[in-house]
Amino acid sequence: MQQPNHAISTRTCKSAALLCFCTPVMTNFPGQVAAVLEDLASEKETDSIWFIGSRANRTERADSDWDFIAFVSDRISERSARHDQVDIIRVDPNWNYLLEGQTMEFSGQFKTWRWRKIESGRASYTVRVTPEVGDRGTFDSEDVRFVKLRGLNVWRRNA
């Protein structure tokens, strides 16, 4: 099935169809990534999954990992990382977030990401890029910049 500006592939998982809204360069996720997404989609508290990061924004390197946001219906809690090359950031209804594999001390407020849905299946968000820390353990604050990136919805629970 084709859409005008992006390819959509559908995989069936235990709970629902996994919709992959992909750039023309990539039409499907590798097996290990797809397996993590299917596992995440099968959890009853997962409402939607969004593809973010360098791969979603076509700025990846060969060693880049795969980054996703999971909007969930329950409060965030500590969970083990599912795969060393797949990062899942869970966001709860109060806009708290936590990366799977990290402790609660690393949780934060997702509103700082400036997440905005811009159309069906697409969103934008802003991240702070901090320069390399120098020999003295500091960096020049004038070199901090904010970058606007995109997120692509790859799965959502049927209403």
Image: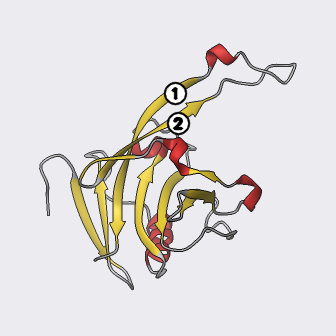
**Relative image position of residue 73 (x, y in whole percent):** 48, 73
Say few, some or many: other residues with alpha carbon within 10 Å of mark 1 (under 14 / 14 to 19 / 20 or more). Answer: few
Left or right: where 70 falls relative to 132: left
The residue located at (66%, 23%) in the rendering is 131
Residue type (three-letter) at the residue carrying disc 1 = Phe
Residue occupied by mark 1: 146
Residue type (three-letter) at the residue carrying disc 2 = Val
Where 130 falls versus 26 (above or below)? above
The residue located at (34%, 57%) in the rendering is 153
Left or right: where 49 falls relative to 105: left
Q: Earlier in the sequence, mark 2 or mark 1?
A: 2
Residue occupied by mark 2: 127
Contact between marks 2 and 1 (CB within 8 A): the answer is yes
**Relative image position of residue 25 (x, y in whole percent):** 30, 45
Spot the residue most to the bottom: 14
**Relative image position of residue 145 (x, y in whole percent):** 55, 23
The answer to which quarter of the image holds residue 79 is bottom right
